[in-house]
Image (cartoon, grey):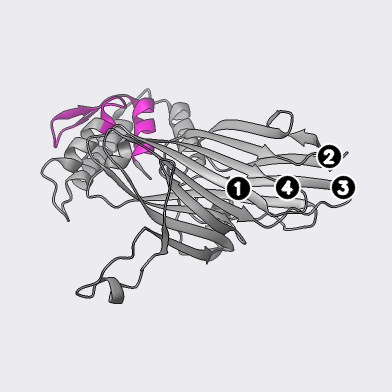
Amino acid sequence: MDVSFVKEVLESIGTVEVSDYKQKVSANNFYTLTQKHAEENFFPGSTQKKDFLSSLYKSIQLSLSGKKNKSYFSLSQAVSKALTGKHILFALNDSRAQEAFSIGGWSSALIDNRVNESGVYNDYVAINEANLGVNKANFSVKRRVYHDVLIDDGDAVAASLEIIYDNDGKSDYKNYLRAIVPFGAVLKDIKLDGKRQEISPAVTNPGIYEKSGFIPPQGLEVEDYEQYDKRVFGFLVNVPKGKKRIVTITYTLPKAQFKNGKLDYSMSYFKQPGTEEYPFTLNLKFPSGVAIVSTQGRREEDRVVYSDRISSDFTFLSSFARR
């Protein structure tokens, strides 16, 4: 479980007194206090955040066991919301039981059970971030995601993924970003704040980059590899404190195959565990001579637009037919 779940619990049970620290913790000040204990006098290997959270967990347990008028309904809602939003995950030794939790979306596994068949176009989007800085800058970072898809009759599908980061914190956000897209995707270019980057294959062998005199390649080092029948593009993105950064990844996908003049577009979005909800917009453009049969998005002249806030995994569907 992560700190977002703890905040939900605090909203359900109210303020808790952490006697070890002589502090009252509520849903309103929880993040501030956690970050304070994590960053003050920090050094690599320090356990101050862990120690504070351990004391808080004990205080929450005492509060739950001591309260006579507990709201179990409110608490169960917090647990349900945390499960759906991946703020609680399960890792089990029993592979069959673990598979069941993974299918239910209660693990970090990249599960995609959709069937590949003619007349169905399966798109996939997942964003995975790792904070490489010795700080908790990720607490202060907000993001917006835009996914553009152009289905061109008979040609490869053009796609882009744009992530806009806003860092309101006091520390830089040193983020290793992995964009996970369908198998067969081919990376075309990457832009940072609108500037096209010179892409170099990432050097990932420690035996090479740890050697004395190693000179990193010029440009943006990008990992480009297959994983779980998906394509992964990984690279470092630094978002300075108090700044905004726009990351745009452009790539092509295999062409769409209509069957009997019909095509079903299915996009599966995988939400990274531990992230707060954020805005997402899909802009799906289709060729002339094609009509929308049904869609979960907003119909426009030559496209479908879908906007929502990402709080869990979801699948978007849209069906087309030739006129």
Disc 4 target residue = 152
From the viewer's perspective, tell me whether residue 131 is left or right of residue 223.
left
The magenta-colored residue range is 3-31
Under mark 1, the amino acid is: Ala
* Inter-mark Cα distance, 3 to 2: 11 Å
Under mark 2, the amino acid is: Gly
Q: Position of residue 178 (x, y in %)?
A: 44, 54
From the viewer's perspective, tell me whether residue 282 is left or right of residue 203.
right
The local secondary structure at tag 4 comes to: loop
Quarter location, residue 185: bottom right
Neighbour tally class for label 3: few under 14, some 14-19, many 20 plus, Cα within 10 Å: few
Q: Residue at x 48, y 39 (%)?
A: 85
Tag in front: 1 or 3: 1
Disc 1 target residue = 159
Residue 97 visible in this rendered orientation of the protein = no
Q: Position of residue 243 (x, y in %)?
A: 31, 34
The vertical placement of 273 against 283, above or below, is: below
The vertical placement of 263 against 242, above or below, is: below
Pick whichever of labels 1 and 3 is earlier in the sequence.
Answer: 1
Pick whichever of labels 4 and 1 is earlier in the sequence.
Answer: 4
Of 231 and 102, nearer the camera is 231
Is 305 within the magenta?
Answer: no
Of 106 and 121, nearer the camera is 121
From the viewer's perspective, tell me whether residue 182 is left or right of residue 173.
right
Tag in front: 3 or 2: 2
- Marks 2 and 1 close (CB-CB < 8 Å): no
Residue 10 visible in this rendered orientation of the protein = yes
Q: Residue at x 16, y 55 (%)?
A: 44
